[in-house]
């Protein structure tokens, strides 16, 4: 009997002991939607500030298409501008088969002194812990037919950009991790009777808080989750603070979204999504702990607006206020490098001068800018003083990559439609035109889809030479790119030159190696000249 009592006590102790670190998982089935990302003209200035700007350190999947990588870069850069200065969040993205789920987010959480679980990224920020360990994994289903989501679709699609903006909010602590057991028709917490900081702020219309409900109180918990007690609120009983809690539980949305329109985390579809994190989303995240440190001095950038946006092509001068009595001043400016390192510029003067930047060795944001973080430390009397400043250095635009992805036959054997993917930065629009050898007319194209766009070139004449010219521009300059021959041979035919003897007509289809190609030829004084070879 004594052994049985001891065994029961040990089991009780193990069950009641809260784990310090846990991984909380959330499966997401994304809606089919016609919503798309449409940055407003003032989006960048609205989201950027000298007072904040952290860094989401991303490990990219190796086998993900370049077009979908754009969605990752866009989502992380938008959230960088919300994070407090000096904060780093480490996220690994994976591109893998998830079965019926579109996205699975695995967020590390840490138990804090108030008894609630915080995202580890937030825990490290609050405790000033210097730790490069992984904060979350976001797994993207490689079987899902994804749309990057930067242009309007005529049919409903699964928008990856929109989805990743929301999933990073989950990593930062937005949303509940309530679980539903369909077989038993019961609800439970991811960790038995333990709640996250977000969950601790949820309460119902009759003032019952989720943090006060035990998992064994099944009816009470079900009524809370399924809104049987009226609306669920976050923090305050206000209309905008109503949390989505429908009578039919939705794992991806219930207690994870808000009812309000016009917000990133709304349960309702938004026709267009701007690249600014709305105040409701950011205020909720601040209330769970994402706040900037209190500072006793302030860095001033001369002739730089509050957004911190300025030109990279001129030098900039910084000072602090108040500056009276400051001893041992130390400035540091961190510029991330493309090779993964960081360039650090330092000064021990009361002012700091950042020279103009001409090198192309620095990491660019999705907008084509360089982000620099400037910090100041000093001593006033017996106290340390500190401030940080987020600087965005704009550059002239750049065309990063151009890929010819499809050559599509039409009813006319000499005319083809051609799809060309363009990756670019520093502008939200581009101009292009096609010039054909035997046509006096230039066919113009325009795209206001930022970062990555697909140009669909119609009825391009293959008989003569056809070239594509692309231009992007902003207030600092422009960049041009050209494909001199849209029908240029991309196949190696030297090893099987005998195949060309099969060509009898001006337009023929033959096999070269394992590829079927269309060959167009003309005759010049009895000699056969192969003009174009196209992959089918």
Image: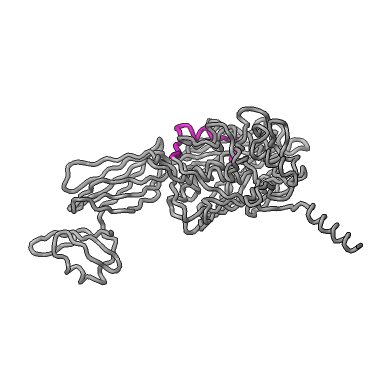
* Magenta span of residues: 34-53
Q: Is residue 532 magenta?
A: no
Q: Residue furthest left?
A: 525
Instruction: In this rendered view, identify the residue nearer to me: 355 or 259.
Output: 259
In this rendering, the answer to whether 323 lies above or below 179 is above
- Image side of residue 420 versus residue 33, left or right: left
Quarter of the view holding residue 248:
top right
Q: Characterize the magenta stretch by its predominant secondary structure.
A: loop
Which residue is outermost to the top? 238
Scheme of colours in the image: one colour
Placement of the N terminus among the 4 image quadrants? bottom right
* Viewer can see residue 404: yes
Name the residue nearer the viewer: 5 or 510: 5
Relative to 63, 333 lies left or right: right
On the image, the x and y values in percent for residue 95 come to: 51, 56
Q: Nearer the viewer, residue 361 or 438?
A: 438
In the rendered image of this protein, does residue 418 appear above or below residue 520? Answer: above
At a point 45% along the width and 33% down the height, the residue shown is 40
Residue 51 sits inside the magenta stretch: yes
């Amino acid at each position: 009997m004594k052994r049985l009592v001891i065994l029961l006590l040990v089991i009780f102790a193990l069950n009641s002991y809260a784990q310090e670190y846990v991984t909380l998982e959330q499966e997401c089935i994304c809606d089919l939607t016609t919503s798309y990302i449409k940055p407003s003209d003032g989006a960048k200035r609205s989201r950027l500030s000298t007072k904040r700007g952290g860094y989401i350190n991303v490990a990219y999947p190796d086998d993900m298409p370049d077009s979908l990588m754009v969605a990752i870069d866009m989502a992380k850069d938008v959230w960088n501008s919300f994070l407090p200065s000096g904060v780093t969040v480490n996220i690994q993205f994976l591109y893998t088969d998830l079965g019926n789920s579109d996205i699975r987010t695995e967020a590390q959480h840490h138990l804090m002194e108030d008894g609630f679980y915080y995202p580890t990224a937030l825990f490290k920020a609050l405790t000033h812990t210097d730790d490069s360990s992984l904060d979350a994994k976001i797994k993207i289903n490689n079987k899902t037919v994804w749309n990057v989501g930067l242009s309007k679709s005529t049919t409903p699609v699964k928008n990856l950009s929109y989805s990743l903006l929301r999933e990073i909010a989950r990593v930062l602590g937005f949303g509940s991790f309530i679980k539903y057991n369909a077989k038993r028709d019961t609800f439970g917490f991811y960790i038995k009777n333990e709640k996250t900081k977000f969950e601790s702020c949820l309460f119902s219309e009759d003032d019952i808080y989720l943090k006060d409900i035990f998992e064994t109180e099944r009816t009470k918990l079900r009524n809370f989750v399924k809104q049987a007690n009226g609306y669920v609120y976050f923090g305050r009983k206000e209309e905008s603070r109503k949390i989505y809690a429908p009578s039919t539980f939705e794992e991806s949305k219930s207690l994870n979204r808000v009812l309000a329109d016009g917000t990133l985390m709304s349960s309702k579809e938004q026709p267009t999504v701007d690249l600014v994190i709305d105040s409701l989303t950011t205020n909720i995240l601040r209330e769970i702990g994402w706040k900037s440190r209190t500072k006793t001095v302030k860095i001033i950038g001369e002739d730089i607006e509050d957004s911190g946006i300025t030109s990279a092509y001129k030098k900039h001068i910084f000072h602090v206020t108040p500056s009276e009595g400051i001893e041992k001043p130390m400035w540091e400016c961190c510029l991330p490098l493309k090779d993964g390192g960081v360039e650090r510029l330092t000064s021990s003067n009361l002012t700091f001068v950042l020279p103009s930047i001409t090198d192309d060795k620095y990491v660019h944001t999705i907008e084509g800018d360089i982000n620099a973080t400037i910090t100041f430390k000093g001593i006033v009397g017996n106290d340390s003083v500190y401030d940080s400043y987020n600087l965005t250095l704009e550059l002239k635009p750049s065309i990063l990559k151009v890929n010819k992805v499809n050559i599509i036959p039409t009813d006319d054997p000499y005319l083809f439609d051609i799809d060309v993917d363009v990756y670019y930065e520093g502008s939200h629009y581009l101009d292009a035109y096609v010039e054909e050898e035997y046509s006096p007319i230039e066919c113009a194209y325009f795209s206001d889809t930022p970062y990555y766009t697909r140009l669909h070139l119609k009825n391009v004449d293959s008989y003569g030479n056809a070239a594509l010219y692309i231009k992007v521009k902003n207030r600092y300059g422009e960049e041009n790119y050209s494909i001199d021959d849209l029908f240029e041979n991309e196949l190696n035919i030297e090893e099987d030159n005998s195949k060309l003897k099969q060509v009898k007509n001006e337009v023929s289809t033959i096999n070269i190696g394992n590829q079927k190609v269309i060959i167009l030829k003309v005759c010049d004084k009895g000699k056969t000249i192969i003009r174009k070879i196209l992959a089918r």
